[in-house]
Image: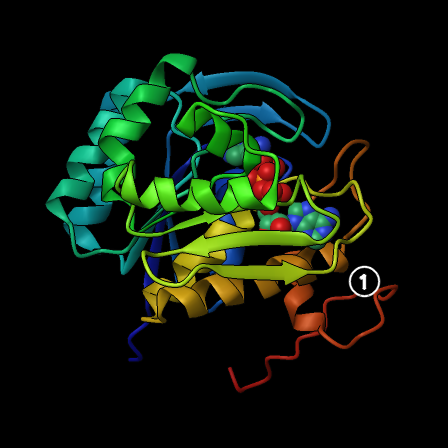
Amino acid sequence: MKKVQTALTIAGTDPTGGAGIQADLKSFEERCVYGMSVVTSVVAQNTQCVSLIHHQPIEMIDRQLACVFDDIQPDAIKTGMIATEEMMRLIGDYLTKYPDIPYVLDPVMVATSGDVLMEESSRAVIREVLIPKATLVTPNLKEASLLLDRSITTLEEMTQAAKDLVHVLGASAAVVKGGHLTEEATDVFYDGGVVHYLTKERVKTKHTHGTGCTYSAVITAELAKGQSMLDAVSLGKAFIHAAIFYGIDLGRGNGPTNHFGYRLKGVPNDINTCQDTRGGEV
Ligand SMILES: Nc1ncnc2c1ncn2[C@@H]1O[C@H](COP(=O)(O)OP(=O)(O)O)[C@@H](O)[C@H]1O
Ligand SMILES: Cc1ncc(COP(=O)(O)O)c(N)n1
């Protein structure tokens, strides 16, 4: 039997499949990593809005985590939507027990639709409990501003934010995502060494539901396979760009990205068929 790498996502759900746990599992699968998931909150949402949020009882989250860790230890972990302080502290305790597992923290606070996904009172706790444990933290502009308590709107400010997430808040590395800012889609990567600017052409589209989830999930999958952080982030960037470029027209609002877009590289983008370019025998 072949050994396969495993990744765990701890996050909220999206029944329309573009964001949250559903996006994470699709992304893990696309990178040939076995995906596992612990649900923090069930979110009734679609491409237009969030309609209702139900937080799982803390014991339920604890038991799900115990079931995973007692049986199949993940090679990498990512967290997405963690709404409450209590959930953050519980997850922080697990991360403390497994300090050698790479941990990607996507500090989900607000959905693309504008709906709030993390309680404001939890902001101090994410800073204090989770960021120092993160191998990588991946805020968008708004999340970086809220975490650092200042406005971040330029490439220079993004660069300083990435440095502060590492040197002031204690993450091992940071990617500040510029999806909402520049002409080009530029992200700033910093791990204490040289600053890297990851740039791709901006795709003119409104279909960006779940971009952050997908990006951080692909990075997590690559770390599970033992890739270096910079290689993992670079692959994540290429993957999310293809997922946006080969966008699919679903839903009435901000539609999802194409999780199999990366497989279509080189194919004209008006063809939206899933072509299995991976080959190989079953
Ligand atoms: N229209 C776009 N064209 C190309 N890349 C984009 C576009 N929108 C977002 N991205 C990229 O998608 C990734 C997720 O970024 P962002 O949308 O800012 O995160 P979030 O979903 O957390 O708000 C980043 O690499 C960003 O640069
Ligand atoms: C459960 C859940 N987690 C995260 C997001 C953020 O999605 P986006 O990447 O579009 O900001 C979401 N809409 N729902």
Identify whether 115 is placed above or below 187. above
The residue lying at 31 percent from left, 79 percent from top is: 2
Residue 19 visible from this viewpoint: no
Can residue 122 be seen in the rendering of this structure?
A: yes
Which type of secondary structure does the marked residue at label 1 adopt?
loop
Percent position of residue 8, x then y: 34, 50
Tell how many labels.
1
According to the picture, the residue beneath numbered tag 1 turns out to be 272
- Residue at far right of view: 270
Residue 105 appears left or right of 50 = left
Left or right side of 43 for 274: right
**Going 42% across and 15% down the picture, which residue do you hit?**
119
Residue 66 rendering spot, x and y as whole percentages:
18, 40
Quadrant (top left/top right/bottom left/bottom right) for the N terminus: bottom left
Between residue 140 and residue 271, name the one nearer to us: 140
Most extreme residue toward the front, as rendered? 156
CB of residue at label 1: within 8 Å of ligand 1?
A: no
Q: Residue at 64%, 45% (x, y): give it.
A: 179
Residue 14 at x, y = what percent? 57, 34
Q: Quadrant of residue 60?
A: top left
Occupied quadrant, residue 91: top left
Which quarter of the frame holds ligand 2? top right
Mark 1: amino acid:
Asn
Residue neighbourhood size for the residue with mark 1, other residues' Cα within 10 Å, grouped as few (<14), some (14–19), many (≥20): some
Residue projecting furthest to the left: 97
- Relative depth, front residue between 61 and 214: 214
